[in-house]
Amino acid sequence: MSISKKSYQTGELPLKIQNLLLEYGEKQKLGISEFMRTFGQSSLNAIANKLDDAVVSEVRSYLDCYLIHSTNKKTVITSGKII
């Protein structure tokens, strides 16, 4: 995913979705200590293997979302929707 070719709209994501992105989201390094997480096919597969269908269904409505966090995953810098 190329960051420069996409537009991003900041916004708050539900805590459950943030936690799922941190745990299962596909990770891309942005800077020295920042990472962006998004849902992709591999993360959906991992969620489907470990959690129930209701969670997978909920995640599908957030496929266009992102979360940027610190290296240690303790600080969420920003989140929102890829437009």
Image (cartoon, grey):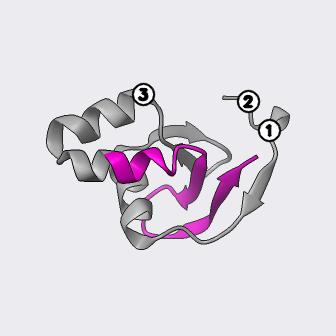
Residue under label 2, please give it: 2
At label 2, the amino acid type is: Ser
What is the quadrant of residue 12 in the picture? Answer: bottom right
Count neighbours of disc 2 (C-alpha within 10 A) and say few if under 14, some if 14 to 19, many if 20 or more.
few
Region rendered in magenta: 57-83
Question: Residue at horizontal 67%, vertical 54%?
Answer: 81
Q: Secondary structure at mark 1?
A: loop
At label 3, the amino acid type is: Gln
Question: Residue at horizontal 22%, vertical 45%?
Answer: 53
**Along the line of sight, the residue nearer the viewer: 49 or 69:** 49
Count neighbours of disc 3 (C-alpha within 10 A) and say few if under 14, some if 14 to 19, many if 20 or more.
few
Residue under label 1, please give it: 6
Percent coordinates x, y for residue 20 in the rendering: 36, 55
* Sequence-earlier tag: 3 or 1: 1
The number of discs equals 3
User: Is residue 76 magenta-colored?
Assistant: yes
At label 1, the amino acid type is: Lys
- Alpha carbon distance from label 3 to label 2: 17 Å
User: Is residue 73 magenta-colored?
Assistant: yes
Circle on res. 37: none
- Alpha carbon distance from label 3 to label 1: 19 Å
Q: Is residue 34 visible?
A: no
* Sequence-earlier tag: 3 or 2: 2
- Alpha carbon distance from label 1 to label 2: 7 Å
